[in-house]
Each structure stands twice: as structure tokens, then as C-alpha cells.
Amino acid sequence: MQSLRDAISANGGTGKALWHFNFSELAAVKAAARLARESGRAIILGVSEGERDYVGVRVASALVASYRREGVPLYLNADHTKSFEKVRQAIEAGFDAVIFDGSALPFEENIAETKRVVEYARMANSAVVIEGEVGYIGVSSKVLDAVPEGIEKTTVEQAVRFVRETGVDMFAPAVGNIHGMLKGGHEPELDIALIRKIKDAVRIPLVLHGASGNTDADLRAAVGAGISLIHVNTELRVAWRKALNAAFAAHPDETTPYKLLIDAEDAVYAVMRAKAAL
């Protein structure tokens, strides 16, 4: 099966984005595998540092690799990795991609640390895809009362310098997106013009984080402007929780976990399928 790097390149001329879905338990993995198997399109599964602490770095890698051996086009990303040591762990465990998230660092330090990650990755495993990030979009994949304070968009000048000096394979700008989703809906609109300007300037695949809650029209416009990969997490968590609550209510005496989780898997799959159809 082709590498993630090749899958990203092959998808470049399709007019569609690749999709990245996070997981911290088996229902989401099974849902993603089902979608990848049925569609034949690459699906990227992500685990943040917190999700990796729960699942296990090598367990996550082995789980996704087991599907790949069956011909299912699943790939694994170490999402929002904030230390060099965590980067090293993910690469050694066989992850296909790593996001080094230095967005909370001063800009110069973000460049320096991301460059260090890229240089290490090229030496350790030239196939691994490295993504960098500039701009602040919040930190939590949860339902929010309000837009996080301190949201800051990436400038074109920052994007150009960051990509040139770090050598990243993919770049995640802040373009009006936020992590998590608002309780009342009405997510901030994405800055489509900024996406287009950054894409024209850097000429590498762009990644949109925090896409939970954004309208279908906004996401389609973002893809048209140059987004190559879209991350969704909070919407999956909300669907999982609602379905599991309903299963508990409908079957108060059931104690078999997989019987209760079937509906959660179906709910997560429905969200994934709808996103992938955009």
C-alpha cells in the first residue's frame, strides 16, 4: 500500500480534501476503517498526546497497521505533539505523520523547534510526514461556551517564512478556525481569502484543524481555496456521547460493552461519512 506521503500527493488533483479523525477508543477506529474500506479513500486517524497516553503509542500504531495489512487505507498521525521526546516516540513507533505544535511558543522558537523535528524525522524515517503550525486556535476538543480568548490568525508573511525555514511537509495556519465547537452553533466563519493567499504563497498542502461545527459550505470553500486535509474531533465525541447515552437508556440492564458501543460506532461513522462526502 502507498505511503501517506504518496496518498496526499495522489489526492492533490481530486478537488477533495483528505479527512483526519481522532480516536481514543475502538468504536471510532472501526468507524473509520469501515469508511476507508467502503470508499477506497485514505483516512487518517489521529491521536493527540492525551489520547496517546490513554491508548498507548505502540498500541495505536499496531492497531492501524493491522488494518493496513488487510488492505484498508488507514494512516496514523501523532496529533498536536508539543515536545521533541513525544515526536521521537511517535516516529519510533511507526506513525505515518507527526504534527509538531509549537503554536504556543514565540514565533522564532516555533521555527527553531519545528526545524529540529523535521531534521530528526528526515534522518529517522524519510517517509514520515511532518506538519507545523502557526497561530492560536484554542486547545480543547470539547463543546465551548464561547470562542477561546486570544485567537490569532496566521499572516502570509509568517507562513512563508515558517515553511521556508523549517522545511515542513504540511502547514496548519490559523484562518478563523477554532478547536472545539460552540454550544449554540454559529462557528466563526473561515477566512477563505487568507487560505487562498497562504496556499498561493507556500505551495505545500494546508491543513485545517478544528473543523467541528463549521458549515458544509465553509468547508467546501476552504477546500476550493487550498485546504488539503481537514481535522474533525469534537463532532465525533458529541455523536459518540449522545449515542452511548441513548444506548444506556434503552438497555438499562445491558452490561456487555460491545453491545452498547455498536450504536456509538454507527453514530461516529455517520459523521465521518457525511464529512468525507463534502
Image (spheres, rainbow, N blue to C red):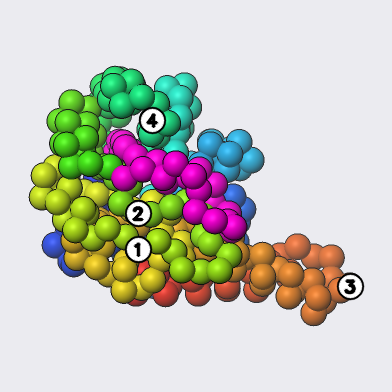
Q: CA distance from mark 3 to mark 2?
A: 45 Å
Which one is nearer the viewer's eye here, 62 or 26? 26
For label 3, the residue is: 253
Name the disc covering residue 176, or none.
2
Distance, label 2 to label 1, CA atoms, is 6 Å
For the residues marked 3 and 4, what is the alpha-carbon distance in whole angstroms? 47 Å
**Among the 4 quarters of the image, the one containing residue 111:** top left
Give the label, 3 or 1, closer to the camera: 1
SS assignment at label 3 = loop
Q: Residue at x 46, y 68 (%)?
A: 186
Other residues around mark 4 within 10 Å, as few (<14) / some (14–19) / many (≥20): many
Question: Which residue corresponds to the image point at 61% horizontal and 53% vertical from the top-left?
Answer: 25
Horizontal and vertical percent for residue 227? 24, 56
**Label 2 Cα crowd, 10 Å radius (few <14 / some 14-19 / many 20+):** many
Tag 4 or tag 1, which sits nearer the N-term? 4
The residue tagged 1 is: 189
> Is residue 205 shown left or right of residue 32?
left
In this rendering, the count of numbered labels is 4
> Is 34 placed left or right of 220 in the picture?
right
x%, y% of residue 28? Answer: 55, 60
Secondary element at image label 1: loop
Identified by mark 4, the residue type is: Gly
Residue 78 drawn above or below residue 233: above
Q: Main secondary structure of the magenta part?
A: loop
Tell me the quadrant of the picture where the C terminus can be found. Answer: bottom left
Q: Nearer the viewer, residue 16 or 200?
A: 200
Magenta-drawn segment? 129-153
Q: Amino acid at mark 1?
A: Glu
Query: How far, Cα to Cα, is label 3 from label 1?
Result: 44 Å
Q: Which residue is mark 4?
A: 102
Marks 2 and 1 close (CB-CB < 8 Å): yes
User: Marks 1 and 4: which is nearer the front?
Assistant: 1
